[in-house]
Amino acid sequence: MVQEKTDRMKHSITIGTVAVALLAAAEASAQSKYGATPQDSVTCVQNLSLYQEFMKQAGGEKDAYAPWKEVLRVCPASSKGVYQNGVKILTAFIDKEKDAARKAGLIDSLSLVYDLRITNFGEEAFVLGRKGTDLYRYAPERCREAHDILKRSVELGGAKSEAGVLSTYYQTLSCLYGKGEATKDQMLQEYVVVSGNIEASMGDAGLKEDARERYGKARDLVNSLFFKVAECADIGRIVGEMVAAKPDDIAMKGRLLKVLNGKDCTEEKVFRSLAEDVHKADPSSESAYSLGLYLAKQNDMGDALRYMKEAVELCTGCADRMKYLLKAGQVASATGSHSQARSFANQVLQLDARNGEALILIGNAIAAQAASCEAPDSWGAYWLAYDYYQRARSLDAAVADKAGDRMASMSSRFPTQQDAFFYQLTDGKSVTVACGGLGETTTVRTRK
């Protein structure tokens, strides 16, 4: 018991002297790299070596603290690693600390370590990002303070900001919104900034896959927070105000267009003019798709198809190619261009062989073709369409009900056994569909 009490006292003294050590480091920051005197240099090198050895050991943060503190006191500019390891030491203490007041003191000391790192080694945008992220992680109730730190980091770092910094920055804003200290307008304005930086980072061809995954998760989190509070009417109003304030800012308009598309607010008054401005200035798959979607909702299918085709053409290898192909096929189907619809659908299946919507599109195109054929050729089109709907239902649960309805519709058009027998056709027989030169094989089915 005596030894346990002694250990607790030592631990208490260790943590209690963190702030003192950091203040000493701040005063010493103007000295030379290894201290002000030859003796300081000896002390610095000895303690650097000692604390680094302890840090190599599992759970060595407690033993590393004393020599680490001495390095801060004597030679705070000796190594960036002093601050990187200082974060590890202090976060280990914070994770174990149960007393709220002492934990708050440790969190303040952690923030001071980050400040001293900036003083001695710069990298303000990066270090402020880590500082704000850790502050929100350990003291989420201090989201105002964390928000201000992260806002400065993002302003300095832009698209080079880490994924976690961008998502945490938006989390702090969401926290403030929940407290009534931020508005929907701010939520949208900062969403445009944050999502724009995320997209810019993800657009870097040299980005490593694990980093790309982190930015993807950050994007999903930011989207979920934004979409919880923003309604289309709010977004449309705020977007209109932002465009009116900066009518020539095409880059901003492009980001705002992504917001409207992401929330499916394409019916807002500002949408068409915004999409046309963006597309005229810099034609892209995104802007073409936006206009096509808008016109489709206005039932202007001819022009909608033109823009959807352009979206596909401009998206040779982009992440949304499958979405554009599918929507182009659906618009083509609505215009009666069934061969085009089938072509787009087949391209979707090359990317995702289990895509039920594409299979239904093909089924629809084949069923529509039956109208141009006489029996028994028209029956073959119905049987073949049924096959595609059946595949869609079995492969893609998301379209199971829709596919089932289409199967029932086809079944109602099957011939009776008597009619089929007249053409030497019996249930289960394999036939090649001649209608419209389809040339695919299907199975005879009769209406029961």
Image (cartoon, rainbow, N blue to C red):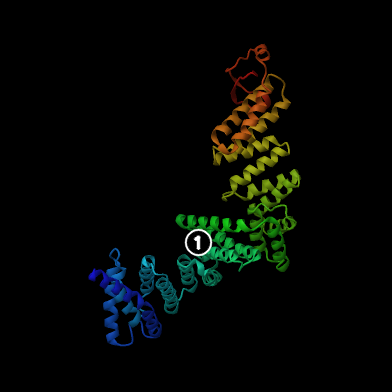
Residue 76 appearing in the image: no
Q: Tell me residue 263's x, y (percent).
A: 64, 53
In the image, 194 versus 123, the foreground residue is 194
Q: Classify residue 393 by image quadrant.
A: top right
Q: Outermost residue, front direction?
A: 1
Residue ID at (69%, 42%): 331
Question: What is the three-letter code of the residue carrying label 1?
Answer: Ala
Residue ID at (71%, 44%): 305
Quarter of the picture containing the N terminus is bottom left
Q: Tell me residue 88's x, y (percent).
A: 37, 68
Label 1, secondary structure: give it: helix
* Image-based side of 239 in relation to 178, left or right: right
Q: Classify residue 326 by image quadrant.
A: top right
* Image-based side of 43 in relation to 390, left or right: left
Residue ID at (59%, 40%): 347
Q: Tell me residue 256's x, y (percent).
A: 66, 60
Residue 196 appearing in the image: yes
Quarter of the picture containing the C terminus is top right
Q: Classify residue 302 by image quadrant.
A: top right
Q: Above or below — where is 52 with respect to 321?
A: below
Q: Tell me residue 361's x, y (percent).
A: 64, 36
In the image, 60 versus 78, the foreground residue is 60
Q: How crowded is mark 1: few (under 14 residues within 10 Å), some or many (20 or more)?
A: many
| Residue that mark 1 sits on | 163
Q: Above or below — where is 278 with respect to 121?
A: above
* Image-based side of 78 in relation to 231, left or right: left
